[in-house]
Amino acid sequence: MKEGKGARLLGFMLLSRNDVAGALAVYHFGQQGDIGSVFSKFRSVQFDPLAPIGSNHDLVLQARVPDYKVGDWKSAAYQSRTMFDGWDKQACLISTDGWPLRRVFHDWQMHWFNSMVEEHPKALDAVLGEIREKGPMLPRQFEFQERRDDWTGSWFGPSVTKRALRALWHSGKIMTTSRQGSNHVYDLTERVIPQSLIESPRCSEDEAIKGILLDRHRAMGVIRPSAQYEVWSMALVKSARRLALLKELVDVGELIRVEIEGVAAHVHPDFLACIGEAVSKKVTFIAPLDPFMWDRKMIHHLFGFEYVWEVYVSESKRRWGYYVLPILYGDALVGRIEFYARKGVLEVRALHWEVGFKRNSAFEKAFDKALTGIKSYSETNEILISEKLDECDQDWLKSAFM
């Protein structure tokens, strides 16, 4: 670990970009484990329904869990209940023992419930009564079905039934007990979360915020205090309050202030233990919403790698592709690749290398191993290489897959 002269007196550590980039690779991908250990460490994984080659949460797990297959997360979420499908950094899969802290989100999102109380109180009573009597239900299975034409075109559509369910979900009165496709199956919270957690004493709002801030740092390892709102996802917490609570965490040693070649950040103490560890020269395909990628300005500062998730960019304006995955090789981000898997066929639709990167035999061997892994993960047996790829890359990939 590198520490500049006078850094201790100033109250922070000086680190090099190389130190931190290598440590990030080790912290995130250097230690493999099972699904439970991933959630114990990272606390939550962002849930996204788009699934060109499994969904984001699948891709996060395949990068860390040996022999992981698309959909393996479901048994942990919906059978053993070691994680739950809820709200954290947007929609997430969250370690179940983290539920008490997330009650603060229910408080912040009560406007959903209050709005429905004012406008459609009978709808809330009706759907809640049906769930209590009949058990888990999809929105379309409710006897109560009502709509408002003036809601047509809104984010959640014209269904009063669905809006009532979302109000109950966001306020913590019901939860997602399973899914059919991307559709939520709802049940009462007390049937999903262990009673011991429901009855656990409530902490203050400040303590809940600090707990979630710590979880963010556990997930990412290092975060700029000025990171964009999406990293924190706490709409009612103003920046000044968040910074004050971060300082309290630093003061008690639960976070460490660092400066990385001119950029201020905080790191979790566990992350510091990874600095100086040897980085395995393996290839990892990284999910677009992986905790590793959450603070993209920091990723650019550390790796010189610019990443834009282009699913919301019109096709004519995309630089790289609809759903490209960053390619990590050791402690360097060397390119991006787009896969698509359906009916036993794995397509490589795009492949872009970073300027100056040159493949060598060691990289190609590591890449071949990663390709074998992604094939097993997606349970595909046929390969299709897009003719839009560079001709040299086409030839190389065809030989790699043979």
Image (cartoon, rainbow, N blue to C red):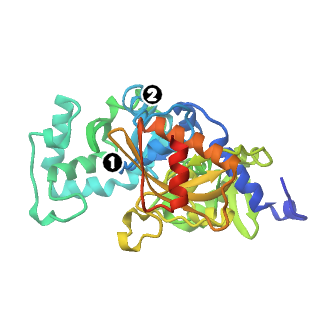
SS type, badge 2 = helix
Mark number for residue 263?
Answer: none
**Classed neighbour count for the residue bearing mark 2: other residues with Cα under 10 Å, few (<14), some (14–19), many (≥20):** few
For image coordinates 69% across by 48% down, the residue present is: 361
Q: Name the residue furthest right.
A: 5
Q: Report if residue 286 is visible in the image.
A: no
**Classed neighbour count for the residue bearing mark 1: other residues with Cα under 10 Å, few (<14), some (14–19), many (≥20):** many
Q: Nearer the viewer, residue 183 or 356?
A: 356
Circle 2 is placed at which residue position?
196
Q: Nearer the viewer, residue 327 or 363?
A: 363
The mark that comes first in sequence, 1 or 2, is 1
Residue 273 picture location, percent across and down: 76, 44
Name which residue type carries label 1. Ser
- Left or right: 135, with 15 as reference point: left
SS type, badge 1 = loop
The quadrant holding residue 84 is top left
Q: Nearer the viewer, residue 203 or 188?
A: 188
- Left or right: 292, with 159 as reference point: right
Name which residue type carries label 2. Ser
Circle 1 is placed at which residue position?
171
Q: Name the residue furthest bottom.
A: 317
For image coordinates 80% across by 48% down, the residue present is: 276
Q: How many marks?
A: 2
